[in-house]
Amino acid sequence: MTTLTKTYTHQHVHSLSLIERYNKLIEKLQFSYFGLISMAILVGSILGGIAAMYVFENDAPLWQFILCLGFCMMNNVFAISQAPVKWVFNTFVLTVLVNAFLIIVNNI
């Protein structure tokens, strides 16, 4: 009977750069593409509706509503048209950031 042995060598842990981590995330999201689409539509639309409500309650300028509406529609168009994963993810993140910013600005 033969015994297998494995020698362990001390290796330096290679930390991934931000771009490498982003590319790994995009690869992982490729597996759940339709889940990403449904979540982008759902969360993006809900957050856009909340941001629009705060814009109207605060009597903010019209450009804030147009900004909110434009990013939400861009997110929905890319998701519904089944654009590449990178586009859907990027527009979703951008939509969340813009609408969160509008909610915070109009809530203060």
Image (cartoon, helix red, strand yellow):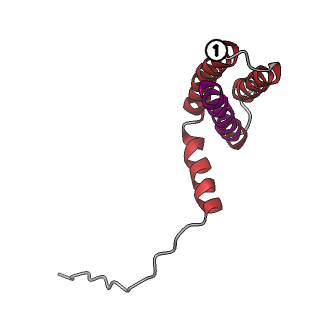
Residue, x 62% and y 54% (percent of image)?
22
42 vs 19: above or below: above
What amino acid type is highlighted by mark number 1? Met
Extreme-front residue of the structure: 108
Quadrant into which the N terminus falls: bottom left
The one nearer the camera, 27 or 92, is 92
Residue 35 x, y percent position in the rendering: 55, 30
**Is residue 103 located in the magenta-colored stretch of the structure?**
yes
Residue, x 63% and y 55% (percent of image)?
23
Span colored in magenta: 90-108
8 vs 39: above or below: below
The one nearer the camera, 5 or 57, is 57
The one nearer the camera, 51 or 90, is 51
| Residue where numbered disc 1 is placed | 53
**Is residue 97 located in the magenta-colored stretch of the structure?**
yes
Would you identify the image quadrant in which residue 69 lies?
Answer: top right
Quadrant into which the C terminus falls: top right
Residue 9 x, y percent position in the rendering: 37, 86
81 vs 84: above or below: above
Q: Residues within 10 Å of mark 1 (few under 14, many from 20)?
A: some
Total numbered labels placed on residues in the image:
1
Would you identify the image quadrant in which residue 62 lies?
Answer: top right
Magenta stretch, main secondary structure class: helix
Residue 28 x, y percent position in the rendering: 55, 47
Residue, x 60% and y 31% (percent of image)?
104
Residue 71 x, y percent position in the rendering: 75, 28
Would you identify the image quadrant in which residue 101 lies?
Answer: top right
Q: What secondary structure is marked by label 1?
A: helix
